[in-house]
Image (tube, rainbow, N blue to C red):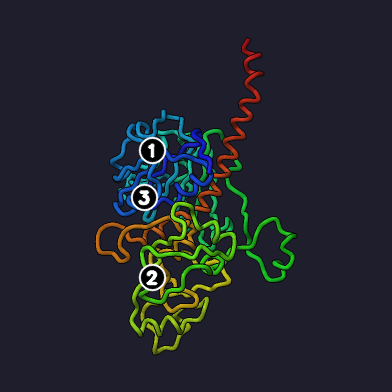
């Protein structure tokens, strides 16, 4: 993977590093990352040891510190990216109100204004589109446009970019040079059996499925597995081969299944593949209604922070492991997560880190498109330099 020193990223609200991983795979160099969570920081630093990390809430990080650590001047950075939580947004008329609930977004805007990158990437939950009748999105766009960015917004489905998971994310892409075509074109699409038989007709590949992602992993029952274990190295398809990573060949991290009681095992076993716990006998049901069993031949449902109890293995009556969830998120096998499996402290669990992450392959698709646009702009500028010099002479 060739890293271009001129393609630089400032990564805010970085979490465990899904965005940084995707941008790195596209050839970008992250100059600094920031998050307040100690365990997410430990995971990020272990997997990206060369990226300086500020372990602090963004409200306590100055723009001058970011620029100094990055060794950049204002206007030098290629991208500032981040996903500040926007639940509970408050508006005053058409504008974002001076409300504590808006603080983290305002901090993101503050850093963008201070760093003034060529491009910005803002990501969030897809539900943001409908918040307050769309007024929140309009207000957010106005904030970026006030800084001089030309912005476009879409909801992208991670499955359309090679992630074996139907995960919608709201994305805003903005540019100082008023580039319009910043969004990547999908590389994968949903297909029926008849369409699969005519696949050469389509320019995109079929959506990857749960079994495309998990079919080669060691089979473990509830209570089995380990934080580090050997892997055969075999793979069944290109996606599994690509997920092997390079740093720790033959090693698999975070493949440890939760211990379940027999009643829970019986309940999980009764859920049909692709179904949920509303489809089991009444005597096995509980008040919990949001337990789903993955279907091998479909993309996964959205991986959440509660995947260990809410997202079940398609064949084994247990919740998904961190490694299985990470595979569904498109993290490589050598990407190691740290922290507890259950919440025993104030810091995020491994489940939280995986569930909150931007899928690296989605981030990579966005980064590759920004790289194309940026390099095309540089090429155009070089083409016109002789003309400009001649006119100035």
Please say if the residues under marks 1 and 2 sit with CB atoms less than 8 Å apart: no
Label 2: element kind: strand
Q: Which residue is mark 2?
A: 225
Label 3: element kind: helix
Residue 234 seen in the figure = yes
Please say if the residues under marks 3 and 1 sit with CB atoms less than 8 Å apart: no
Q: Position of residue 279 (x, y in %)?
A: 48, 83
Q: Which mark is residue 201?
A: none
Q: Position of residue 350 (x, y in %)?
A: 35, 61
Q: CA distance from mark 3 to mark 1?
A: 25 Å
Name the outermost residue toward the top.
393
Label 1: element kind: helix
Q: CA distance from mark 2 to mark 3?
A: 22 Å
How packed mark 3 is, by other alpha carbons closer than 10 Å (few <14, some 14-19, many 20 or more), is: some
**Quarter location, residue 255:** bottom left
Q: Check the image and report above or below for 129 versus 23.
A: below
How packed mark 2 is, by other alpha carbons closer than 10 Å (few <14, some 14-19, many 20 or more), is: some
Q: Which mark is residue 46?
A: 3
- Lateral position of residue 211 relative to residue 42, left or right: right
Upstream in the sequence, badge 2 or badge 3? 3
Q: CA distance from mark 1 to mark 2?
A: 42 Å
Upstream in the sequence, badge 3 or badge 1? 3
Q: Which mark is residue 111?
A: 1
Q: Check the image and report above or below for 306 versus 366.
A: below
For this rendering, which residue is in front, 338 or 312?
338
For this rendering, which residue is in front, 91 or 169?
169
Q: Position of residue 2 (x, y in %)?
A: 53, 40
How packed mark 1 is, by other alpha carbons closer than 10 Å (few <14, some 14-19, many 20 or more), is: many
**Quarter location, residue 341:** bottom left
């Amino acid at each position: 993977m060739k890293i271009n020193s001129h393609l630089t990223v400032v990564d805010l609200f970085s979490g465990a590093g899904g965005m940084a991983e995707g941008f790195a795979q596209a050839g970008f160099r992250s100059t600094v990352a920031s998050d307040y969570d100690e365990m997410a920081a430990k995971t990020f630093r272990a997997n990206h040891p060369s990226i300086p990390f500020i372990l602090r809430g963004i409200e306590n990080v100055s723009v001058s510190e970011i620029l100094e650590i990055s060794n950049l001047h204002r206007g030098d950075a290629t991208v500032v990216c981040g996903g500040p939580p926007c639940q509970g947004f408050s508006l005053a008329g058409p504008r974002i109100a001076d409300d504590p609930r808006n603080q983290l977004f305002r901090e993101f805007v503050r850093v963008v204004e201070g760093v003034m990158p060529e491009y910005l990437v803002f990501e969030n939950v897809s539900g943001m589109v409908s918040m307050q009748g769309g007024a929140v999105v309009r207000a957010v766009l106005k904030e970026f446009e006030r800084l001089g960015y030309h912005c476009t917004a879409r909801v992208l489905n991670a499955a359309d970019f090679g992630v074996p998971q139907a995960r919608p994310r709201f994305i805003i892409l903005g540019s100082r040079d008023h580039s319009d075509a910043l969004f990547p074109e999908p590389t994968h699409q949903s297909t029926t059996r008849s369409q699969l038989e005519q696949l050469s007709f389509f320019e995109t590949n079929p959506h990857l499925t749960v079994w495309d992602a998990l079919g080669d992993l060691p089979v473990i029952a509830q209570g089995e597995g380990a934080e580090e274990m050997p892997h055969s190295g075999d793979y069944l398809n290109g996606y599994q081969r690509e997920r092997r990573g390079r740093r720790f060949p033959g090693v698999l991290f975070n493949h440890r299944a939760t211990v379940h009681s027999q009643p829970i095992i019986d309940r999980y076993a009764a859920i049909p593949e692709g179904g949920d716990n509303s489809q089991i006998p009444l005597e096995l049901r509980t008040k919990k209604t949001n337990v789903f069993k993955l279907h091998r031949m479909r993309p996964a449902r959205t991986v959440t922070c509660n995947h260990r109890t809410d997202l079940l293995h398609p064949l084994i009556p247990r919740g998904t492991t961190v490694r299985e969830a990470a595979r569904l998120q498109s993290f490589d096998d050598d990407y190691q997560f740290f922290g507890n499996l259950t919440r025993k402290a104030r810091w995020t669990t491994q489940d939280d880190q995986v569930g909150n992450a931007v899928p690296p392959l989605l981030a990579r698709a966005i980064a590759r498109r920004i790289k194309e646009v940026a390099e095309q702009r540089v090429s155009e500028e070089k083409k016109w330099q002789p003309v400009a010099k001649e006119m100035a002479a």
